[in-house]
Image (cartoon, grey):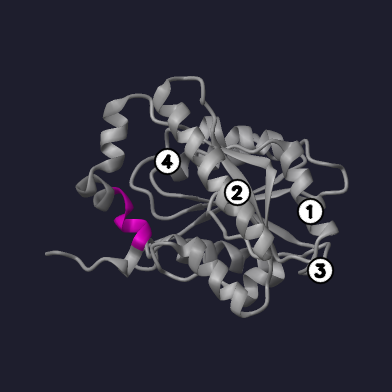
Amino acid sequence: MVPLLNEENTIFSYVNNLINELNSVHSTIRPNIVLIDDASSDRTLENLHIIRDATMGIRTNVYVLERKFPNAQQGKGASLNYGLDFISSLEHQYDQQHTIIGIIDADGFMSSKDMTNIIGTFENNPVGMVQSAVAMNRREYNWLSRMQDTEFLGANSFMQESRNRLGQAIASGNGQFLTMEMALNVRWGNSLLEDFEFTVRGLFQNYRAIFLPSAIVCNPGCDNLTDFDDCCNLERFYHDWRPWIGDFFNDPS
């Protein structure tokens, strides 16, 4: 699943590349991709339909879902649950334990090799969820990207490896893979950290998660200090993320 909100500039690069990688996963895997537009105000939905029409007949089945007001923009968790309900309504070749749902950001990238290895991790471990490592896809671009890459592949991966030793990794949102059985039984909430909330709720239902450091999902890093300042600007954060956060913040007006 790929949730999208005003991502018209990423559609033809990142999403298209992700579809190409899905076409190359191991032959025993039946790939599908569900693209969920959460009532975008730009040309995201239009571009999604262009990609779907252009990829008809290829190995990966491409589904485009459109959320509409008043039900749209109620948080990322609500968008994921909407996609989950659609997936559960499809005719499945495999049972819920062998149907794996992955969550990738609209500007994320994962190779077919890493996705295949994640599926293998489910086969070899009694887990309901596998979380990949996170890195920057342009780590050599500048020092800001290298700093972000060090944080994600260094500190964050170290903490996840430590959690592996305790028997329970946590979801990081991007690069999160889980069985359909776990997704249907746990589902996502509307908290700001919906990925962490999902992990805790799954733990209470005895679902175990594992961190796979050899599989990496890549995000774009900051190009310059202006982008970095924007990331740290609380007013901009509130404006950009309020549609995803839903009711977590009260409207100050």
Q: Earlier in the sequence, mark 3 or mark 1?
A: 3
SS class, disc 1: helix
Distance Cα–Cα, label 3 vs label 4 = 33 Å
- Vertically, is 161 above or below 147? below
- Left/right placement of residue 244 relative to residue 105 reads left
Q: Are marks 3 and 1 in contact (CB under 8 Å)?
A: no
Q: Amino acid at mark 4?
A: Glu
SS class, disc 2: loop
Q: Earlier in the sequence, mark 3 or mark 4?
A: 4
Q: Are marks 3 and 4 in contact (CB under 8 Å)?
A: no
Q: Earlier in the sequence, mark 1 or mark 4?
A: 4
Disc 1 or disc 4, which is closer to the eye?
A: 1
Residue 89 visible in the picture: no
SS class, disc 4: loop
Q: Earlier in the sequence, mark 2 or mark 1?
A: 1
Disc 2 or disc 1, which is closer to the eye?
A: 1
Q: Amino acid at mark 2?
A: Gly
Residue 242 in the magenta stretch? The answer is yes
Q: Which mark is residue 175?
A: 2
Disc 2 or disc 3, which is closer to the eye?
A: 2
- Vertically, is 51 above or below 203? above
Q: Which residues are magenta?
A: 240-245
The residue to which callout 3 is attached is 95
Disc 4 or disc 2, which is closer to the eye?
A: 2
The residue to which callout 1 is attached is 121
Q: Position of residue 29 (x, y in %)?
A: 82, 49
Q: Amino acid at mark 1?
A: Thr
103 vs 162, nearest the viewer: 162
The residue to which callout 4 is attached is 7
